[in-house]
Image: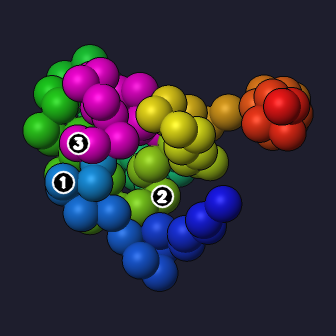
Amino acid sequence: MEERDFFKNPFNRGEIVDLLQGNPASVMFNFRSPSFKKLGLKPESQGNGELIDLMLNEPRLVRRPVVKIADTVYFGADRSVLEGLIDQMKQP
């Protein structure tokens, strides 16, 4: 298991695109963040490129935690989901 503090070591564009796995950037974006609210932007008015740019400039806009298990990425998973995933990994 690898841990990364993306406030100290931010994602680059390629990493974000890889994590998204073809999904829209909105699945990774934290629209509830105070940092987003300060911008005064409307969520529906932002395209994938703009959302990625915003996350690159402000890591607080990434939905946390970001957990990658095998080929699946989870954004903003709650504790019970993460515990279930960990339990699944422990099973032979």
Residue type at mark 3 is: Val
**Mark 1: few, some, or many residues within 10 Å (few <14, many ≥20)?**
few
Give the labeled residue for mark 2: 60
Q: Quadrant of the C terminus?
A: top right
CB-based contact (under 8 Å), mark 1 and mark 2:
no
Q: Is residue 23 above or below residue 30?
A: above
Q: Nearer the viewer, residue 84 or 29?
A: 84
Q: Is residue 23 magenta?
A: yes
Residue at horizontal 37 percent and vertical 70 percent from the top = 10
Q: Which quadrant of the structure image shows residue 71?
A: top left
Q: Which mark is residue 14?
A: 1
Q: Amino acid at mark 1?
A: Gly
Identified by mark 2, the residue type is Arg
Task: Determine contact: label 1, label 3, CB under 8 Å.
Answer: yes
Residue occupying the point 55% across, 72% down: 5
Of callouts 1 and 2, which one flags the residue occurring earlier in the amino acid sequence?
Answer: 1
Stretch of the chain drawn in magenta: 17-32
Residue 39 against residue 76 in the figure, above or below: below
Q: Residue 24 location, x and y as percent?
A: 27, 23
Classify 76 as above or below 60.
above
Residue 79 visible somewhere in the drawing: no
Q: Secondary structure at mark 1?
A: helix
Q: Nearer the viewer, mark 1 or mark 2?
A: 1
